[in-house]
Amino acid sequence: MKRFFLSVLAIALLTANGCDQKSMDSKPVAVNKPSVTMDDVQRDAATSLKTTVAYSQQNKDRIVKNLKEQLATMDTSIEKLRLKGESLANDAKTNWDLKMVELDEKRKSAHAKLTEVEASTAKAWTDVEKGAQSAWEDLETAFQNASKEF
């Protein structure tokens, strides 16, 4: 019985060892990846373009809304400043009038840029936005300069 048990154990060990050896010698199975076709690329590119345009449109809408709010606030502030400046006399009034002319020019430029941003397409608005930001900064600087005078 002992011999039978040892024989079965030896066969089991040899079989197990043989299986391990085979699994070590075998090459890994390659996983076939599906190939990418031109249709796949075109479909993905079209989806990407639509997403990009939608994102740009959202940003454009947000910028236009912010610029409108800022310009409305600035217009109110300019009108208040204009009323305060009416009480000035002589040289101060002349200097004040020159500042207000400059401020009005900057204000018109900022409004024109806002109109340009609103009319631009979502694809092209980023270039126009830079001009609008610049016009806004010019207007803000002119307002601050005029406010310092009073």
Image (tube, rainbow, N blue to C red):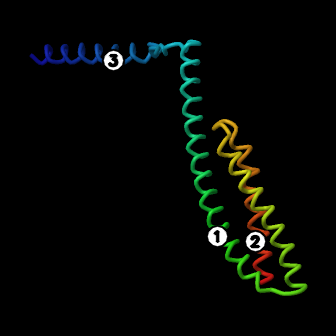
Badge nearest the viewer, 3 or 2: 2
- Disc 3 or 1, which lies upstream in sequence? 3
Q: Amino acid at mark 1?
A: Thr
- Residues tagged 2 and 1 counted as in contact (Cβ below 8 A): no
Dot 3: few (<14), some (14–19), or many (≥20) neighbours within 10 Å?
few
Q: Residue 147 sits in which quadrant? A: bottom right
In this rendered view, identify the residue nearer to me: 30 or 143.
Answer: 143
Task: Give the left or right position of residue 101, taking residue 33 as reference.
Answer: right
Residue at x 72%, y 82% (from the top left corner): 84
Residues at marks 3 and 2, CA–CA distance in whole angstroms: 89 Å
The residue shown at (59%, 60%) is 69
- Circle 1 residue: 76
The residue type indicated by label 2 comes to Phe
The location of residue 50, given as percent across then percent down, is 56, 30
Give the residue displayed 76% in from the left and 58% down from the top: 108
Judge whether 82 appears above or below 56 on screen.
below
**Residue 143, label in figure:** 2
Instruction: Please state which of residues 23 and 142 is positioned toward the viewer in this rendering.
Output: 142
Q: Which type of secondary structure does the marked residue at label 3 adopt?
A: helix
Q: Position of residue 141 (x, y in %)?
A: 78, 69
Say which of 83 and 6 sits in front: 83
Which quadrant does the C terminus fall into? bottom right
